[in-house]
Image (tube, rainbow, N blue to C red):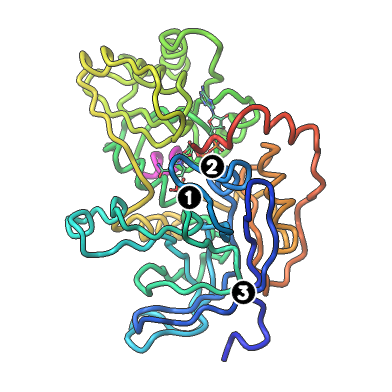
Amino acid sequence: MATDGKSNLSFVLNKPLDVCFQDKPVPKINSPHDVLVAINYTGICGSDVHYWLHGAIGHFVVKDPMVLGHESAGTIVAVGDAVKTLSVGDRVALEPGYPCRRCVQCLSGHYNLCPDMKFAATPPYDGTLTGFWTAPADFCYKLPETVSLQEGALIEPLAVAVHITKQAKIQPGQTVVVMGAGPVGLLCAAVAKAYGAFKVVSVDIIPSKLEFAKSFAATHTYLSQRVSPEENARNIIAAADLGDGADAVIDASGAEPSIQAALHVVRQGGHYVQGGMGKDNITFPIMALCIKEVTASGSFRYGSGDYKLAIQLVEQGKVDVKKLVNGVVAFKDAEEAFKKVKEGEVIKILIAGPNEKVETSLDTTVDEKKLEEAKASGGSGCC
Ligand SMILES: NC(=O)c1ccc[n+]([C@@H]2O[C@H](COP(=O)([O-])OP(=O)(O)OC[C@H]3O[C@@H](n4cnc5c(N)ncnc54)[C@H](O)[C@@H]3O)[C@@H](O)[C@H]2O)c1
Ligand SMILES: OC[C@H](O)C(O)[C@@H](O)CO
């Protein structure tokens, strides 16, 4: 068997800031429709960092030890008897949430809203920072030959961006403002461009993020100021010459001032999408929403077709996800990688699977002062 002699070492969160490595049994294929995947690479998401720091996101509370990670790509090592679409050796991007397939939401095509979703590294379900993982075959997406396994690990956040940007109903030639230039905002900007947006404005409060955004996908950038949301909105419109406002505005920050400015940037009859997660309740400019007849949507994870499109965008060179990767670390350095993400100076770090031979390509020395400052400034920006 392809797992013989291989480690199923897993990176486990016991409680906030208390992690360990555990060698768990290799999972068994329990359904003829499932496959067994050897994990090659996993990206660290803001939600993983949030669980590591706080042990909870909203009402999802880590009560028992939980394996972290959900942005993964791997190689098929065994397939169930009924699997026709994948074979041993195929390289796949993993969609990490499995819906019930029977409820009203699933049957109406919105499986991401399934109330019984089993989502990796969302308690009580273990995540993918492990050696081997079982998944339904139809939630594993074969990577084209030209797409690497490291790019495969970036398909998950790209699928989030594909879903958010679909909600914005962007038409070719339109203008789009993306609030927040973290991984999700950067990917939304790139997807908006791929959907045909003529101008894409990235907004953030950190100059270095905007410098990167300009080199990645943004046609314009704006450094948000400590002024009123209306004034920031006027400045964004002026900076990118957006006329009566942007056709679509996406929030990928979850920050209250950014959400407020967004409603003043969007044009009459435009679209607003809430992709960022933040405080449960904020002051929201309902008059702007109302009198401009803005169409506002939420966006949660990804649904039918989003992974497929994300892979196509990478395959066709429309979104260069490699540019987001600051480095790859060996599995044993997973905790250092989390600290590095929390320091706030990297975009994406990949953790190699425990059976993957990798030379660490990232300086994992952690600047404790920067880490303390980042911790003091609040959560991961996630929830
Ligand atoms: N909807 C979903 O399914 C989904 C999935 C994944 C992540 N998310 C959420 O998307 C958001 C972005 O994720 P990420 O991984 O890029 O997070 P991130 O924390 O790396 O990025 C957030 C960015 O927003 C910027 N920001 C903060 N305040 C701002 C302000 N006032 N104006 C403009 N920018 C501001 C930050 O500097 C940062 O660059 C998070 O809130 C995350 O929880 C949502
Ligand atoms: O990309 C998926 C997200 O990280 C998750 O939905 C998380 O933020 C909430 O559980």
Mark 2 C-beta to ligand 1 under 8 Å: yes
Label 2, secondary structure: give it.
helix
Residue at horizontal 21 percent and vertical 56 percent from the top: 109
Residue pushed farthest bottom?
1
* Residues marked 3 and 1 touching at CB (< 8 Å): no
Q: Quadrant of residue 241?
A: top left
Q: Tell me where residue 83 appears, x and y as whole percent.
A: 35, 83
Determine which residue is flagged by label 3.
24
**Which quadrant of the rendered structure holds the N terminus?**
bottom right
Is residue 191 shown above or below 103? above
Label 1 sits on residue: 157
Within 8 Å of ligand 2, the CB of disc 1? yes
Earlier-in-chain disc, 3 versus 1: 3
Query: Helix or strand or loop: what does disc 1 sit on?
Result: helix
- Does 348 appear above or below 223? below
Which amino acid type corresponds to the residue marked 3 in the rendered image?
Lys
**Residue at (45, 37) in percent of width and height:** 189
Residue 343 placed where, x, y %?
70, 38
